[in-house]
Amino acid sequence: VPMSMMEQAAGSTAGSVAANWADGATAGISTALAGDRGRGALDAMNETNPNASMAGWLGGGIMGAAGLEMGAAKLLAPGLARFAPRVADTAYGGTYGATNADEGEGMAGAAIGAAAGLGGGILGQKLFSAVGKGFTGVRDPMVQRLNDAGVPLTVGQSVSRSGRFGEQMKAIEDAMTSLPGVGGMVNARRTEGLGGFNAAAFDTAAAPGATITATGADGMRQVRQSVGDAYDSALLPSQIDTTDAQMIADLAQARIAADAIPDVQPTDPRAFANAALRNRIEGGIDPATGMMSGRNFQEAYRGLGRSGRERANSDFGYEVGQVTRQGQDLLGEALERQNPGAFTGFLEANAANRRANVLADAMKNAANQGDELITPAQLNRADVTSTSRLEGKINSASGNRPFYDLATAGQAVLPSRVPDSGTASRMMTGMALGGVAGAGGAGGYALGGTEGAQAGSGGSLAAALALTFGGTKGVQRMATKALLDRPDVAIRIGEQIQRNPRLAGLLGSTAGGNLLASLVSGE
């Protein structure tokens, strides 16, 4: 660019943007080629139009560093291509340092600029990622699953799955549960969280539309009542006309399937399958009217299921099971065909009944607890046992269980039991917290002598102090809300930032190179 043109553009906004864009895109080469008069014109632009100059320089710098990165990715061997961003940052910073150094100090400027570009790129990405996480808050799916279910969490629990810092916060909070006074507050908040988990479990167990206001024995009675009401709503007003032509045809097909089973003695699976159809279906029909009530439908449907499970491991058990399932299907289709919505309601009641039984089994395991609170582990064990028995081990192991999401999240985040608060534990806690403070003090001493040691110890205990204030209910609610409940727009911004951290790396490399280049040149 001719110097006269740069000098003429020094007072204009557009000229400031263009000149600084060229300077940033070429890592200072264009300005170096323009000589002292070009550098003077650029300095005048920066003083006259600082904002436009900064915008131009940032845009050009990002473009230049990005171009170097693409070039490095193509030139490096396939196994080394992942280092292209670092190579580009170093090259850009080194070039900027060399082009802006005083005469005779180009090598020193290049070395310092390269280091600054590399460091700035790494630091920029780290800071950008941190900013992104700040926008999104805690997004761990386990923590969010509990938060969405209305389970109150402590600060330590909220961040427990957010990297090493979160693990340390959780460890400090765990230790604090055994301290006199403070431990009582933390344990109270954790007990509230366990209570919230129980409330979520009882809500999950209840039939759709039911409102559960208690846990423990009272809550169990409400859940059972909701199941009974669901069955009544679906079946009491319903009945099946078994003279329906479609049902007669379906039943005839089921009998054909039963007759096709081999007559193997002494178990005689063919006779068993036919007897199941006859006793379960025909036994529930009123001979005077040919009608089957909703309650008799329920008994027939369940009975066929029991018959199929009874012979599952016997000769031709699979074929017998197919016949009993065929009988269940024709009953369900007849109920739904003649009473729209009844079979769907029945299945929902069945699912709620299964969930209620899982909850009852978990409560048996918690019977020795005075507060009747179920732990996530107890609920998970009951859920696994029930699913393995009714649906098979493969379904259970694959997570196809009614309480899988809630129980798994609870086990990952909540305590399995209320921590001991005895004297021995308090002594161990004091030693643990003292060790943390000591470690912080030692690190501080290494960096800053006695004053550094004092600062390190205080910094290590700052988390414990923050968690202590978080032990109060009001502060906990505010803190966890700030961590977990972010507006959708903030989450989207944060996700975009986290998906594009290299943008800040490019900015950091250009800024780092420019800064140290300025220091080397004395500007």
Image (spheres, rainbow, N blue to C red):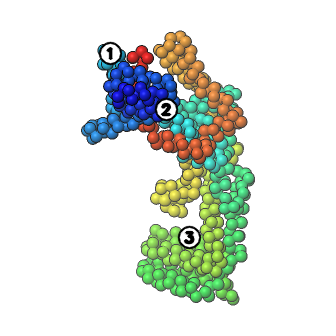
Along the polypeptide, which appears first: circle 2 or circle 3?
Answer: 2
Q: Quadrant of residue 72?
A: top left
Question: Residue 290: where, in percent of width, then height?
Answer: 65, 87
- Residue 180, how many percent across, how many down? 68, 27
| Callout in the foreground (2, 3) | 2
Which disc is residue 140 wearing? none
Residue 62, quarter of picture: top left
| Mark 2: amino acid | Thr
Task: Answer whether labels 1 and 2 touch (C-beta < 8 Å).
Answer: no
Where is mark 2, residue-wise? 13
Q: Earlier in the sequence, mark 3 or mark 1?
A: 1
Upstream in sequence: badge 1 or badge 2: 2
Seen at 66% across and 53% down, the residue is: 202
Residue at the spot 48% in from the left edge and 81% down from the top edge: 258
Is mark 2 in CB contact (under 8 Å) with mark 3?
no
Circle 3 residue: 306
Residue 154 seen in the current view: no
Separation of marks 1 and 2 at Cα, in angstroms: 30 Å
Q: Amino acid at mark 3?
A: Arg
User: Where residue 470 appears, x then y in whole percent?
Assistant: 66, 32
Q: Is residue 479 above or below residue 305?
A: above
SS at circle 2: helix
Would you name the residue on which mark 1 appears? 103
